[in-house]
Structure formats: structure tokens, C-alpha cells
């Protein structure tokens, strides 16, 4: 009843091409931002920030990044964990080796390092497709696992091979409390989401989607495959690299190479699939879903009063993840984002069904 | 002076002794023909005669084993499809090759890729050139959408459209590039009479209004005879006829190979 | 020289085991175009089922035979379930969706197998001889040390490859499988029932997984890490090509030998542990020169 476009005529192409063409959408986003920046900080406690909001936000950033590559450009990557690792370790090295460098700059440099690695490992995508490429990205995953655990220079020769960092401080302002960390991550996510949205609705986004849908036809139109694929790799790994730096510095605080292993890569891919391939909001929904599901499953037996071993819970988690992946691919390939959209469409008609 | 002579310009594209083979299979043998500016040229022939291969050679998907293509006066060496696009060659496909996950609007907008120039940062922020050019090109695309009469479906994902409309959208995508030379691979395959009439009208309008040179492959002889200024006939990868519709209709070799007994 | 041959041989024999896992991939890829990431999970599931049944049935008259029969029955049921619940709903979806679906199968199967059978390390002993022997003593001084179980594994793998080759080339079902691999729709239109073919090929892949699981399991114990063997088999596929049985075998041998030799001869200079990624980099480097693998076919894009 309140969510509809009747009476809102678009008189210019500019208005029609706006991100949120319907007035209610603008209000809706404003409300979300208000909730994110004002309401949640007032209500949530430290545990909720640390266990839910911060990881969900950082993973959403990574998932949006991977979605640009997989969902929009159609290049499957199983190496997201590796890009996160590159982002984290590069940021760390810039920080310790260049004194007084602003940590935010370090995060961006971490992202750029991931971009460089992404472009190098994107080069095979020009010759190989599909599964071959997926396996090639696995090569990156194993190679970075090894690099950061065996080459001590990257960990600054710490004896254990793990890294611990101080809370991030920018111009004397220390991001030490969960609420400050949360606001930092949320700000980064909002900025990157806007960038992602701008890219996918413009020329470069269309070039990615065209390459995904029909690469031969795309080339005949004048889209160079090398440009489309490598730019998708570059942007995607930049996003994921920055997410990796945030994950390490803001969420974990101390970490070892195992924090970025292949399971992380799979998790991020699952976020993209379940959230919705080729949808920005899908990345966020998927990240929330995949991060929260284990928490929920761990709590469930306690709520129900069933005694269940942690091993059992983790096996069940595997089964549920697996089943959900198959379910979403078969029944709703567009994922949670599609369900979200259907809800909005229903709302548009409500309360009149036709 | 008849109608045609007034319309046609100098030679736009010239194929010289093109041969193409896949492994041992010869797809094209020693094919030569010319296309003049503003001409509508039809390539006909039985299935497997090498018609699509010929188009693929023209826009750089296949590289001929022998022979050369001269386009706009320059002989070109090995060329990639995107380079052909840059020189103003656009095409449609026998089996529709639209971007299925994208809307009609986005498909046609994609056709204008080469005309856009905003830098990466501007695109990230959607400011300045990036934003203005989106709006400017949207106007052009809307003109094409009006021309093809597909206004009502502009936001529909093309995967959901019926076959005939998809063919039309694909034509729109090719037109969006404002090509000098338009290659149409069986633009009317699988259409009913009305759809064929619509499509024929669009093709003629494109040729008349924009002066676009058109090379098309088509099996429907009625359509071919009506639309084209000249016809090239291929059979088993060899050229067996080249001339006006009237000449082709009376060419004995062509009748034997392809048209069947004329009554 | 003797040491080099010893390293080479142990690498080759490890490679045989990689080939076994890769074979399962190739079978499914050939017949259904699906890149089955769950092959490793199937190895684990088959081995777990088998080893636990052995334990349950240990007081019966023929534990091994009974356990084998029931495990095979379970693998058939698994193939049917996958066909019904995964492949059929996803028919005509792009290959990459099916690939991601098999990731789902892998996760599900890992969880399911361990929920059903537990997640400890189980030792598996079905009488494969243990210990090592010296061979080729006449050629090299002191001979070459090899593990007996590796020899047995090699023989079994060799037999399996020959059987599969005969199955594909000579039997009616094998011909149908090849027809399906060439063109799904055409095969269907000449009356080859697609669903039935899928069940068969996934069953065969399940049996290959069982063989691989039993051999690996008696070597390392049946445990979760068996599932990760699949990751070792991927570079083998890249090297050998996804569609070639012979490629899987030769690719496995190259990867196995290359990995061991690299670890021994290059590893010490770069800090060791390069076994972890060497196979992948070898395969990746190879890909740049021959994207379709050693024995894969070149596909011409038609437009």
C-alpha cells in the first residue's frame, strides 16, 4: 500500500537511471543507514558487535567483491581466502616497514597488492574457462598458504609465525572499542557498496555481464575479453584484499596463515551463491546468513535442551550448508536477493493481490 | 539510371580469394566478391555452404588460410573481432547470441560500449563524464528502441522474451554501434510471416535512413529477392553465382544447386 | 642414482593413487559434463562406510564380502539420490552451476558420513601386505626400497583402468555413455535414457571412489583428510585433460613423480613443504601452453 510507483512518473532518463528510482526505496535506504549508524550503536552490546556485526560486515565486503567476479563477470574463483591473506599481510608489511603510515592507507595498499596478485592470476582466464580457471585459482590459494607460513619475511620473523597487531589508530583516534570498530567497518562497507553499484550499472558492469553471458558476442561488439576479465579480477581482488586487511586488523587482531585457508574461500563463495549471484544486496544477505548460521546451530541444541557434541554440531553444519547450496542452485539460483526482491514486489501490490 | 545506381557508393568491402579450412575440411574455397557502400547484399546457399563462415571471416572470428579482405580501402591482416567492431562492423547471429541475464535496455546499451569513454574513477563514483555519457547514450538507445517498437519490454530480461522479439533486440544491439557494415546471419529464421515482414521493413529502413551497408544470410527466397540489391550464391564453400536478383533467378548453375527447378 | 630412482618410484606410486581419484572425476565429466568436486567426499564416504561395516560385521562368516556388498549398495543408492535430488533439478543449467552444486554435495556428504559413522581415525586392514621390500637389486647397488602396499595399489589401479577402458569401448552401456558425453540431446533422441545413464556413471565413480578409499585408507587410516585427496587430484585433471582416462593415469604419474622430486631436490632451497602447491603450479604453467590438457580435445567455438 505504501510501497508503490504509481504517480511517480520519470520525466528524464537521469531519473530513470537513478539507483533507487522509487521514492520509497530512498526512504528505505535512509532508514537502513539510520539503523546502521545510529540505532544499532545505541542498542547493541559488545558481544553482538564482536560476534555478529563486525564479521558480517567485513564478510559482506568480501562477498560483494567476489560477486563482482563470479556473479557479474562469470569467472569462478576459489581463491578468495588467498586474496584476503594478501590484503592482510601486505597491509601488515606496509605498516611495519613504513613508519607513521596512516593505517587506512595501509588497508588500501593491501587491497592494491591483492589487485596486483589478482591480475596476475587472472591472466590464465584469458586462455582457460570455467573449471580450469577454478582450479587455477586454487593454485593461488595453496601458494599463498605456503608463502605466508614458510617465508618468514612476510611475518617479520615472528617465532610462532602468527601476527598480533595494535588497535588501528588514525590521527590519534584509536579504534579500540567494538563500537568504534563497527562504525569503521560499516563506513568502509557503505563506500565500497556505492562504488560497486556504480560500476555494475555503467559501461564496465555491462562489459562484465556481457562477457559472462556470451563472451564471443561481447567481443564482436567491441568488448576486449582481456579488459573485461582482468578489470573484474582487479576490482574484485581489491575489494577482497581490503576485506582481508579489515578482517585481520579489526576483527581478529592476531592471526596466522590458517585464518585464510581454503575453507574461507569456500565460505565466501557460498555467501555469493546463497545470497544471489549478480546482486550487490545478495552479497550482504549471504554474508549475514553464512556467518550467523553456525552461531544459530550452536545455540539451537541449548535452546531445545538437547545434548549434542560440538563435533556433531559441526557435522550438521556441513550437511545443512551442503543441502542449502544445492537447494538454492536448483530452486532459487538468484538466491536470497531474489527472495528479497519478490517480497518487495509483493509489498508493491499489497494489500490488493492484483 | 535505375534506382540502385544512384544509391550505391564506392566499394566498401572486398574479399579476394578467401579460403578457409578446419583441419582437412574446407569451409571456403577461393571466394571473391565486393560489397558497395549502402548496398544490401544477400549470401545464399544450402546448409553447410560456408555462409556463416564467410561472415565470421569478415568480422575477424575466423582467420582465412589464404586470401585477403579489403575494408574501407585498406587490406587487413589478421584481425580480432573487437578490432572489426572498432572499424564499424556489427553483426547478429544465427543462433541468437544475446546477453541473457541482462535487460533489453542493457543489451542495447552494451552495443554502445565503444562509443563510451569515461575513465575508471569517474565510473566508480558515477560522476562527470560517466554520468553524462550514460544519459546521453540512453537517449540514442531509446531512439533505437522506438525504431524497433520494443518500448514496452525495455526493462525485461531478454531470456524471458519470445524468439521473434529476441531477434529484434539483437538487431537493436547491432544498430546501437551505428555500424557502417551490418552483418545479419539469418535474421528471419524461425519467424512467421508477420514477423518476417516487420524484420524486412526494419532492415530496409536501416539501409535507407542510416545508409548502412548490409550483408545478410537468409533462406527465404522471397525475402532475399525483395530485399537485396545483389546476391552471392555459395555451394560447398565455392561461389557459384553473383548478380542481381533477376540474374540469379535465371542462373542455371544456381537453379541446379539450390533453387531447384524453376517454373 | 639408486636414491633418485627410489624417489621417482615412490612418487610414481603416489601418483597412481592420485590417478585413481582423478579417474572418478573423468568418468563423471565424460558422461555428464559435470565437474564433480565431491569425488573426494565420495572417497571418504565409501571408505568410512566400508571400515565401519567391517567393524559391525566382524563376527559374521564373511565380514569383508558382506561389508563390500553393503557398501556397494550404499554407493548405488547415493548415485540414485544425487541423480534425483541434484542432477535432475539442475538439468540444462550451466556447467558452472552444477560444479557449485557438487561443492554442496561434497559438504553434505562429509557431514553426513561423519554423522552416520563418526569422525575418528579408523584403521583399515583387509590383508594388503605391509612393509617394504628391495627391488631391482641387480640394476642398482643396494636395490631400491619400495612399500609393498604401493605395489599392490599400483596393480589394482592398473586393473581398474583396463577394466574401465574395456567397459567404455566394448560394452553397450559404455557406448551409450560415450554417446551421452558427445551430445545429451542427440543421445536422448535415439532412446538412451539419460537419467539411467547418470545413475550408472555416478555408481561407477562411486565404486572407483571405494577402491581409492580402501587403498588410501589402509595406507593412512580412514579419516577426514581422505576427503581432501580430491584437491590433489585436480592438478592431475588439468594436466591430463578432463575427458581422458589415459590422461588421468599419465597426469597422475607426472604429478606424483614431479611432486616428490621437487620436494627432495628443490624443497630444501625454499624452505620445504612445496609439495603443498607444486602440483598446482606445474599444472597451471602447463595450462598456459596447452589449455585443453595433455589428452583433452580442442573445442572450436561456433557462432
Image (cartoon, coloured by chain):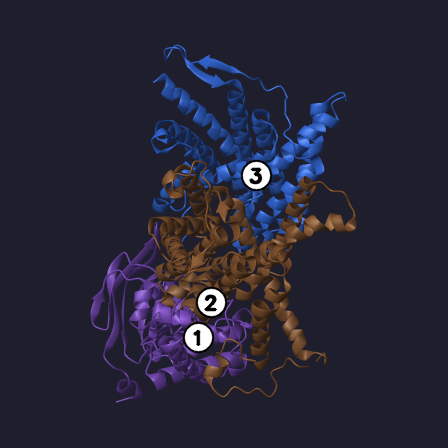
Nearer the observer, B146 or A132:
A132
In the displayed orientation, state which residue is furthest to the right.
A305
User: For numbered disc 3, what is the local secondary structure?
Assistant: helix
Chain B appears in which tint?
A: purple
Question: Which residue is at 65% across, 78% downward?
Answer: A348
Nearer the observer, C209 or A194:
A194
Chain C appears in which tint?
A: blue
Identify the subunit bearing mark 1: B
**Which residue matches tag 1?**
B108
A29 lies left or right of C115: left
Confirm whether circles 2 and 3 share one chain.
Answer: no
- Residue B214, quarter of picture: bottom left
**Which residue matches tag 2?**
A191
Identify the subunit bearing mark 3: C
B179 lies left or right of A32: left
In the displayed orientation, state which residue is furthest to the left.
B74
Disc number placed over residue C40 in the picture, else none = 3
Label 2 Cα neighbours within 10 Å, binned few <14 / some 14-19 / many ≥20: few
Chain in brown? A
User: For numbered disc 1, what is the local secondary structure?
Assistant: helix
Q: Quadrant of the C terminus of chain A?
A: bottom right
Label 1 Cα neighbours within 10 Å, binned few <14 / some 14-19 / many ≥20: many
Amino acid at each position: 500500500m505504501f510501497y508503490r510507483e504509481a504517480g511517480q512518473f520519470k520525466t528524464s532518463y537521469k531519473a530513470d537511471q537513478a539507483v533507487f528510482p522509487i521514492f520509497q526505496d530512498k526512504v528505505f535506504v535512509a532508514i537502513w543507514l539510520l539503523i546502521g549508524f545510529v540505532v544499532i550503536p545505541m542498542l547493541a552490546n559488545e558481544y553482538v558487535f564482536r560476534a555478529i556485526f563486525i564479521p558480517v560486515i567485513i564478510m559482506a565486503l568480501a562477498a560483494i567483491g567476489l560477486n563482482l567476479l563470479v556473479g557479474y563477470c562469470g569467472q569462478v574463483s576459489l581463491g578468495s581466502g588467498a586474496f584476503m591473506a594478501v590484503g592482510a599481510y601486505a597491509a601488515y608489511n606496509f605498516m611495519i616497514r613504513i613508519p607513521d603510515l596512516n593505517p587506512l592507507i595501509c588497508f588500501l595498499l593491501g587491497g592494491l597488492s591483492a589487485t596486483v596478485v589478482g591480475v596476475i592470476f587472472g591472466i590464465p582466464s584469458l586462455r582457460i574457462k570455467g573449471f580450469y580457471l577454478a582450479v587455477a585459482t586454487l593454485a593461488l590459494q595453496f601458494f599463498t598458504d605456503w608463502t605466508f607460513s614458510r617465508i618468514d619475511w612476510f611475518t617479520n620473523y615472528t617465532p610462532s609465525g602468527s601476527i598480533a597487531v595494535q588497535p588501528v589508530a588514525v590521527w590519534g583516534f584509536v579504534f579500540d572499542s567494538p563500537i568504534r570498530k563497527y562504525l569503521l567497518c560499516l563506513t568502509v562497507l557503505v563506500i565500497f557498496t556505492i562504488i560497486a553499484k556504480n560500476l555494475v550499472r555503467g559501461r564496465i558492469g555491462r562489459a562484465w555481464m556481457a562477457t559472462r553471458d556470451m563472451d564471443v558476442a561481447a567481443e564482436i561488439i567491441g568488448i576486449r575479453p582481456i579488459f573485461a576479465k582482468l578489470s573484474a579480477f582487479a576490482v574484485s581482488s581489491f575489494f577482497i584484499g581490503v576485506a582481508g586487511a579489515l578482517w585481520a586488523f579489526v576483527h581478529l587482531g592476531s592471526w596466522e596463515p590458517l585464518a585464510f585457508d581454503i575453507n574461507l574461500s569456500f565460505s565466501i563463495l557460498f555467501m555469493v551463491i546463497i545470497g544471489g549471484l549478480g546482486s550487490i544486496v545478495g552479497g550482504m544477505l549471504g554474508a549475514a546468513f553464512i556467518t550467523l548460521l553456525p552461531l544459530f546451530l550452536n545455540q539451537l541444541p541449548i535452546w531445545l535442551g538437547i545434548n549434542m557434541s560440538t563435533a556433531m554440531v559441526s557435522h550438521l553444519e556441513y550437511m545443512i550448508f551442503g543441502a542449502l547450496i544445492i537447494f538454492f542452485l536448483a530452486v532459487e539460483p538468484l538466491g536470497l536477493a531474489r527472495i528479497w526482491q519478490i517480497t518487495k514486489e509483493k509489498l508493491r501490490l499489497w494489500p490488493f493481490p492484483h | 539510371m535505375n534506382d540502385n545506381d544512384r544509391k550505391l557508393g564506392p566499394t566498401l568491402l572486398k574479399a579476394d580469394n578467401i579460403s578457409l579450412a578446419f583441419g582437412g575440411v574446407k569451409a571456403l574455397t577461393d571466394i571473391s566478391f565486393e560489397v558497395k557502400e549502402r548496398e544490401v547484399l544477400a549470401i545464399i546457399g544450402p546448409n553447410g555452404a560456408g555462409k556463416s563462415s564467410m561472415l565470421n571471416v569478415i568480422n575477424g572470428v575466423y582467420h582465412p588460410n589464404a586470401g585477403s579482405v579489403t575494408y574501407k580501402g585498406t587490406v587487413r591482416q589478421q584481425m580480432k573481432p573487437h578490432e572489426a567492431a572498432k572499424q564499424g562492423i556489427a553483426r547478429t547471429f544465427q543462433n541468437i547470441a544475446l546477453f541473457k541475464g541482462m535487460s533489453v535496455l542493457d543489451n542495447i546499451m552494451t552495443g554502445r560500449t565503444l562509443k563510451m569513454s569515461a575513465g575508471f574513477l569517474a565510473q566508480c563514483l558515477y560522476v562527470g563524464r560517466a554520468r553524462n555519457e550514460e544519459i546521453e547514450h540512453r537517449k540514442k538507445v531509446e531512439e533505437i528502441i522506438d525504431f524497433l517498437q520494443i518500448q514496452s519490454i525495455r526493462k525485461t530480461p531478454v531470456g524471458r522474451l519470445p524468439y521473434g522479439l529476441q531477434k529484434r533486440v539483437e538487431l537493436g544491439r547491432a544498430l546501437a554501434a551505428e555500424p557502417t557494415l551490418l552483418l545479419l546471419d539469418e535474421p528471419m529464421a524461425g519467424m512467421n510471416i508477420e514477423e518476417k515482414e516487420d524484420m524486412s521493413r526494419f532492415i530496409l529502413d536501416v539501409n535507407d535512413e542510416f545508409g548502412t551497408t548490409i550483408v545478410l544470410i537468409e533462406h527465404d527466397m522471397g525475402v532475399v529477392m525483395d530485399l537485396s540489391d545483389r546476391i552471392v550464391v555459395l555451394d560447398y564453400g565455392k561461389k557459384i553465382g553473383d548478380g542481381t536478383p533477376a540474374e540469379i533467378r535465371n542462373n542455371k548453375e544456381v537453379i541446379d544447386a539450390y533453387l531447384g527447378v524453376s517454373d | 642414482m639408486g636414491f633418485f630412482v627410489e624417489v621417482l618410484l615412490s612418487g610414481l606410486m603416489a601418483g597412481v593413487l592420485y590417478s585413481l581419484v582423478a579417474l572418478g572425476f573423468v568418468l563423471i565429466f565424460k558422461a555428464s559434463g559435470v565437474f564433480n568436486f565431491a569425488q573426494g567426499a565420495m572417497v571418504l564416504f565409501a571408505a568410512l562406510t566400508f571400515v565401519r561395516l567391517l567393524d559391525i560385521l566382524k563376527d559374521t562368516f564373511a565380514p569383508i564380502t558382506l561389508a563390500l556388498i553393503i557398501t556397494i549398495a550404499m554407493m548405488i543408492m547415493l548415485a540414485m539420490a544425487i541423480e534425483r535430488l541434484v542432477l535432475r533439478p539442475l538439468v540444462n543449467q550451466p556447467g558452472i552451476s552444477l560444479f557449485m552444486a557438487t561443492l554442496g554435495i561434497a559438504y553434505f556428504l562429509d557431514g553426513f558420513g561423519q554423522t552416520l559413522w563418526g569422525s575418528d581415525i579408523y584403521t583399515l586392514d583387509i590383508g594388503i601386505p605391509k612393509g617394504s621390500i628391495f627391488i631391482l637389486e641387480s640394476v642398482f647397488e643396494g636395490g631400491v626400497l619400495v612399500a609393498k602396499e604401493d605395489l599392490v595399489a599400483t596393480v589394482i589401479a592398473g586393473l581398474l583402468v583396463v577394466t574401465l577402458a574395456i567397459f567404455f569401448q566394448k560394452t553397450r552401456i559404455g557406448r551409450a555413455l560415450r554417446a551421452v558425453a558427445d551430445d545429451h540431446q542427440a543421445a536422448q533422441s535415439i532412446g538412451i535414457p539419460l537419467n539411467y545413464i547418470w545413475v550408472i556413471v555416478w555408481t561407477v565413480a562411486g565404486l572407483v571412489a571405494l577402491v581409492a578409499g580402501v587403498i588410501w585408507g589402509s595406507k593412512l587410516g580412514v579419516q577426514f583428510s581422505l576427503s581432501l585427496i580430491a584437491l590433489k587430484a585436480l592438478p592431475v585433471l588439468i594436466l591430463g585433460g578432463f575427458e581422458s582416462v589415459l590422461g588421468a593415469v599419465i597426469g597422475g604419474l607426472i604429478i606424483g613423480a614431479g611432486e616428490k622430486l621437487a620436494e627432495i631436490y628443490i624443497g630444501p632451497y625454499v624452505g620445504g613443504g612445496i609439495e603443498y602447491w607444486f602440483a598446482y603450479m606445474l599444472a597451471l604453467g602447463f595450462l598456459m601452453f596447452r589449455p585443453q590438457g595433455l589428452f583433452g580435445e580442442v573445442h572450436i567455438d561456433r557462432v
